[in-house]
Every structure is written in C-alpha cells, then in structure tokens.
Amino acid sequence: MGVLNVTPDSFSDGGLYATVDAAVARGLDLMAAGADLVDVGGESSRPGAEPVPLDVELERVVPVVQALAAAARRDGHGVRVSVDTVKPEVATAALAAGASLLNDISASLYEVAAAAGAGWVAMHMRGLPPTMQEDPQYVDVVGEVSSFLLERAERARQAGVGEVWIDPGIGFGKTTAHNLSLLRHLGDLVGAGSGAGCAGVLVGTSRKRFLGVLAAPGSEALAPVADRAEGSLATEAAALVAGVGMVRVHDVAATVQMARLYGPAA
C-alpha cells in the first residue's frame, strides 16, 4: 500500500502533493513503482494534527481517487485505490468515485464499507491525533490491541463486510516500547486474525517517530525523517516474516524490491 497524502501538514511529505495534479502524478508513480494499492488521504493523522473541514477534505480526496481509479481501470494492471479517512461522507464519496478499500483509523466506518461493497481496514488508536501521544498507557498492549481489533472485525462481518483487514496502529497512541512489543508479537495477531476470518493484517511503520528514536540512541533528538528508510525497511521485512499481508509505505520501489528478495527465500 503506497501512501499518498493530499495534505499540507503530514509528517513526512506534507505539501508535496497538495494539489490534485501533483497528487495524481504521484499516485501514478506509486503504481508504476509496484504498489498494489494507493492509499489517498486528505487529513493528516500525525500526532498533534487538527481535524480538517469536511468540504476541504472532499475537495482534496475525491478528484484524486476518481482519476487514479480510472487510470487503474484503463491500464488494466490491477492496482486498487483506497481512501484513508474517518469521515463517513468522505468515505462514501471516495468509494463511489472508485476506491475499493476504506482505511479507517477510527475503526468505526464498517457500515459505510458494507453499504458500498468495499473492503475495510480497522486500525487501533488510543485517543485522537491531537492528544494521542501525550501519555498512552496499557496494562497489556498486545492483548488490548488484539481484543479490540478482533471485536471490530466481528462487527464488520456482522454488518456484511466481506474483506476485513486489521491494523495494530503503530504510533497511534503508543510509546516506542508499545510499538516494539506489538511488532514482536505480530505473528500472534496474524494467527488470531486468520482464525477470525480476516483478510490479513496491515502494518504501517514507514518513517514513523519511533524509528527516529531508535536511529538516534542516547540522543534526545530524533533522527530526521530522511534518515528512517533503513528502519522502515527492516520493520517491514520483519512484518512480512511474521505473516503480515500488507505494509503501508512511502518508499514503494525500495519496499517492492525488498519484498521480491524476501519472497523467493520464503
């Protein structure tokens, strides 16, 4: 899943693809680089991000989804378009415009996906983006995240969603230690999801803050986003080894190469 942020304020590439033309061009580049899905989002969910007005998010997202879905159909290469949103109105419009997967960090829009006959990703998030990193606490982060996701997956199936993915929400209301614990136990989540009839587990570690912490040991400063590529690929490879079915990434070409190198050895 290639990340396409049609935003001015996303933590990694905010502002680079903030116009429709630039976003569509970037989406076509992600397809050419080997992405299986292009995930279009018009509202940043980075820690501290503020909500975007509905009309603004619709203007950012829908034309891009429509253009990329049309290009995928025209070229016949099987790439899907997904929409990353928590607003039911944006989800409905984007699915009508050609998206076939709803990437939902709120884990609440399963009825929207069901009504559209689309797939749905349920992600775990403790709190909301503006405050989620202030003091995240868990008694058992692995157990709590897993239980939440399996419960939401069951709700979605009962609502009629045929394709349900679960995402542990790395970096969403979690400390570095929480993130690492979830990554160490991905195999357990994969097994639980499979037993519950999920399509698979989706994991997004690409360029995230905890990688900046790990890349600068002993320092109070984070390694900059540009220096997190190695950590991104390492954690994505570990996720594939654990059986994860999809990784959400910024650096599609490098990740595709890594996955191809890993595949024959598996």
Image: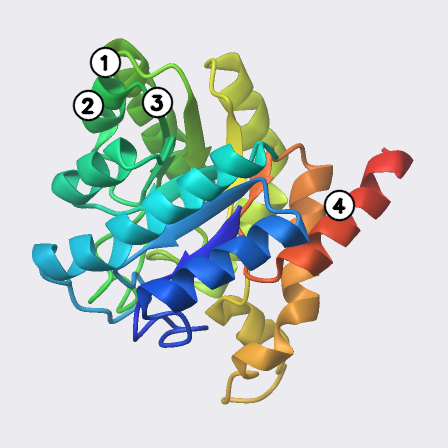
- Give neighbour class at mark 2: few <14, some 14-19, many 20+ (Cα, 10 Å): some
Q: Which residue lies furthest to the right in this view?
A: 265
For marks 2 and 4, the one nearer the N-term is 2
For the point 21% across and 19% down, the residue is 115
Q: For numbered disc 1, what is the local secondary structure?
A: helix
Measure the C-alpha gap from mark 3 to mark 1. Answer: 10 Å
Which residue in the structure is indicated by mark 4? 259
Measure the C-alpha gap from mark 2 to mark 3. Answer: 12 Å
Q: Which residue lies furthest to the front in this view?
A: 74
Which residue in the structure is indicated by mark 2? 111
Measure the C-alpha gap from mark 2 to mark 4. Answer: 33 Å
For marks 2 and 3, the one nearer the N-term is 2
Badge 1 vs badge 2, beta-carbon distance below 8 Å: yes
- Up/down of 189 relative to 18, above or below: above
Quadrant where the C terminus is found in the figure: top right
For the point 22% across and 54% down, the residue is 127
Q: Looking at the picture, how far across and down is residue 159, in whole percent?
A: 23, 13
The label on residue 159 is: 1
Q: Looking at numbered disc 2 in the image, what kind of residue is underneath it?
A: Glu
For marks 1 and 2, the one nearer the N-term is 2
For marks 4 and 1, the one nearer the N-term is 1
Does the image show residue 90?
Answer: yes
Q: In which quarter of the image is residue 148?
A: top left
- Give neighbour class at mark 4: few <14, some 14-19, many 20+ (Cα, 10 Å): some
For marks 4 and 3, the one nearer the N-term is 3
The label on residue 153 is: 3
Measure the C-alpha gap from mark 4 to mark 1. Answer: 34 Å
